[in-house]
Image (spheres, rainbow, N blue to C red):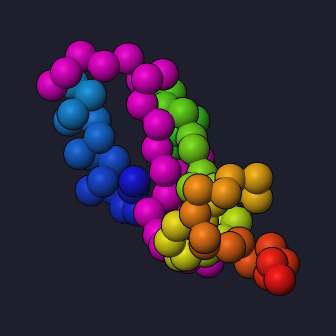
C-alpha cells in the first residue's frame, strides 16, 4: 500500500533488488476509510501508469469501510452480518 513518494521509492528499490517485472507489482492506496482511498486513487493510478505497475483498489474498504470480519452474503461460516444483511429471526 502506498500513499506518498517515499512509498513509491521503496517499491522501486524492492523491484530492483529482486529483479521483478513491473507487471507483477500491484499498488494499492493506503487508508482504512473510503475517503482516504478515494483521495489517493488518482495519484496511485498515475504512478501505476508511469511505472507500468498494476492498480488494485481495496474493495473491502470501499464497500464496507473499516469493518472487520465481513463475509459474503451466502457465507454462513461467520455470524458477522454485512451492513445491509437483514437479521434472522
Q: In the rendering, at what x and y percent does residue 28 appear? A: 49, 50
First to last magenta residue range: 17-45
Is residue 45 shown to the viewer in this render? yes
Direction from residue 30 to residue 5 in the image, left or right: left
At a point 54% along the width and 33% down the height, the residue shown is 54
Q: In the rendering, at what x and y percent does residue 89 appear? A: 83, 83
Q: Residue furthest front?
A: 89
Residue 64: name its quadrant.
bottom right
Residue 3: name its quadrant.
bottom left
At a point 67% along the width and 57% down the height, the residue shown is 76
At a point 60% along the width and 72% down the height, the residue shown is 80
Direction from residue 11 to residue 74 in the image, left or right: right
Q: In this view, does 83 lie above or below 31?
A: below
Q: In the rendering, at what x and y percent does residue 77 appear? A: 59, 56
Q: 82 or 57, which lies in front?
A: 82
Q: 83 or 25, which lies in front?
A: 83
34 is within the stretch colored magenta: yes
Q: 7 or 83, which lies in front?
A: 83
Q: Is residue 79 above or below residue 54?
A: below
Is residue 50 shown to the viewer in this render? no
Q: In this view, does 36 lie above or below 62?
A: below
26 is within the stretch colored magenta: yes
Question: Looking at the image, how many numbered discs can be counted on the residues?
Answer: 0
Direction from residue 52 to residue 1 in the image, left or right: left
Q: Is residue 45 above or below residue 15?
A: below
Q: In the rendering, at what x and y percent does residue 21 appear? A: 38, 17
At a point 58% along the width and 63% down the height, the residue shown is 78
Amino acid at each position: 500500500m502506498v500513499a506518498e513518494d517515499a512509498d513509491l521509492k521503496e517499491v522501486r528499490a524492492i523491484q530492483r533488488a529482486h529483479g521483478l517485472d513491473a507487471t507483477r507489482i500491484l499498488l494499492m492506496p493506503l487508508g482504512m476509510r473510503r475517503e482516504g482511498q478515494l483521495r489517493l486513487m488518482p495519484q496511485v493510478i498515475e504512478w501505476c501508469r508511469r511505472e507500468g505497475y498494476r492498480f488494485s483498489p481495496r474493495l473491502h474498504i470501499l464497500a464496507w469501510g473499516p469493518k472487520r470480519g465481513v463475509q459474503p452474503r451466502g457465507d454462513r461460516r461467520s455470524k458477522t452480518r454485512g451492513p445491509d444483511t437483514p437479521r434472522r429471526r
